[in-house]
Image: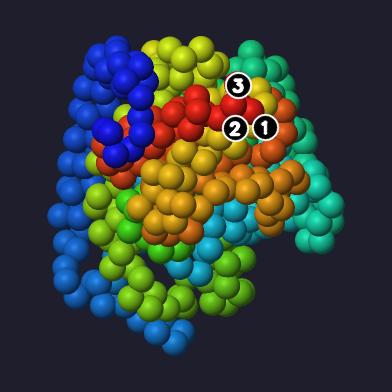
Amino acid sequence: MDRWGIGDSLLKEAVLAEKAIEPEISAIEKRAAENSLKVLAGFRDAEIGEHHLQGSHGYGYHDSGREALERLFAKIFGGEEAIVRPQLVSGTHALACALFGLLRPGDEVITIPSVPYDTLHPIFGLRSSTGSLPEWKIGVRGVELADVLAGKPVCKPETRVVFIQRSRGYAWKDAIPLGDIETCIKRLKAQSPKLLAVVDNCYGEFVKEREPCDIGADLAAGSLIKNPGGGMALTGAYLVGRSECIRQAAIEMTAPGLGKEIGPTLGLHRSFFLGLYLAPQLVGEAMKTALFASQLFHQLGYEVSPAPKQSRTDIIQGIKFGSREKLLAFAKGIQAAGPLNHKTVPIPAPMTGYEHEVVMAGGTFVQGGSLELSCDAPLRPPYVAYLQGGLSFTHGKLGVLLGAQVLLNAPKAL
């Protein structure tokens, strides 16, 4: 490791960290193998062939490959139908289509957690924005998960949708376990049988054996440049769930009367098929990287979430640095490990959809590709870095070690 400038003392800590997490690494590898076989079985059952990889242009009518890909996503993720499109440019975009497709003036949506991920704030009217749900006379109300799990009545006659964010987002809190999501959906639907459950599944695909639609969600959404794209998808997002819900979201995505029937794939869905095939194994690599980071920084005296022995339901690892200088030093080390732009120094800057300046690090092949090794953080106390990805555990470990070494070397960070 001489060429990387990592000191002997840190390398000794790394050896101790790897030894400490051996049982958890084995469990991750077993789950990755099971999910890989599930995906492979899906390909075989759907009889995916080379002719499905060709793509379409123009309006994209009668694209058999797109239709096969959407059937495959529906099968793997436990839904009746799916939308998988490059025209959906992010998970936030897919969720907006779902919410605006399902809700009508006079309806209410409740959100769990009560304050969701930053980029969703304009949709819910938590930050001023033209076109928010409240502007269309749709009520928005935050609800605490603990209240639902305690059996408290939270639904009103006008409550139409519960939105549940699975991952931790930019918040120092635990991601929501699938078991809690299942209980939450059951209890809310007992209060209001017509309620629809929409789950933001970003960062959570293939982390466990089940997915949100397997446990009662009516609709789940995510980004293809995160887990399910397997590091191959260049853009895109997906929606999966009940047919009626998918049709309503599709109208919002395109136009009334068009729905899912149009949408050229332009050859991109070859990478969607390949990425999905690879995704379970690569999600496993990302989880091993997150686990290693948790153990190493725990040994170095930092507060981490999840803790090393804690159950995980997304690929994100939070590390609390407590100061701007320490956070930026760590980000510099992650950037230095990237295959691209390794000499670039991450600088905080305003970013569309975020209230605070954000620093992003990662020499990724896909801009914002969060299954590749990267970290990002809003520049606000308590200055938490959110680490994710790592297409190989070897690269992930190197990135974590470089982040730690740059931090140790930076006088202002100490």
Q: Quadrant of the N terminus?
A: top left
Amino acid type, label 2: Leu
Colour scheme in use: rainbow
Comparing 156 with 348, the one in front is 348
Comparing 123 with 67, the one in front is 123
Cα–Cα gap, marks 1 and 2? 5 Å
The residue wearing badge 1 is: 324
In the picture shown, does residue 123 fall above or below 258?
Answer: above
Q: Position of residue 175 (x, y in %)?
A: 53, 27
The residue wearing badge 3 is: 414
Number of marks in picture: 3
Tell me what residue is drawn at x 50 percent, y 69 percent. Answer: 87
Q: Position of residue 193 (x, y in %)?
A: 60, 35
The 10 Å Cα crowd at callout 1, few under 14, some 14 to 19, many 20 or more, is some
Q: Position of residue 398 (x, y in %)?
A: 33, 35
Amino acid type, label 1: Arg
**Badge 2 element:** helix
In the visual, does 38 lie left or right of 413?
Answer: left
Amino acid type, label 3: Leu
Residue 401 falls in image quadrant? top left
Q: Earlier in the sequence, mark 2 or mark 3?
A: 2
Cα–Cα gap, marks 2 and 3? 11 Å
Labelled pair 1, 2 in contact (Cβ < 8 Å):
yes
Labelled pair 1, 3 in contact (Cβ < 8 Å):
no
Cα–Cα gap, marks 1 and 3? 11 Å
**Badge 1 element:** helix
Tell me what residue is drawn at x 78 percent, y 55 percent. Answer: 132
The residue wearing badge 2 is: 327
In the picture shown, does residue 42 fall above or below 257?
Answer: above
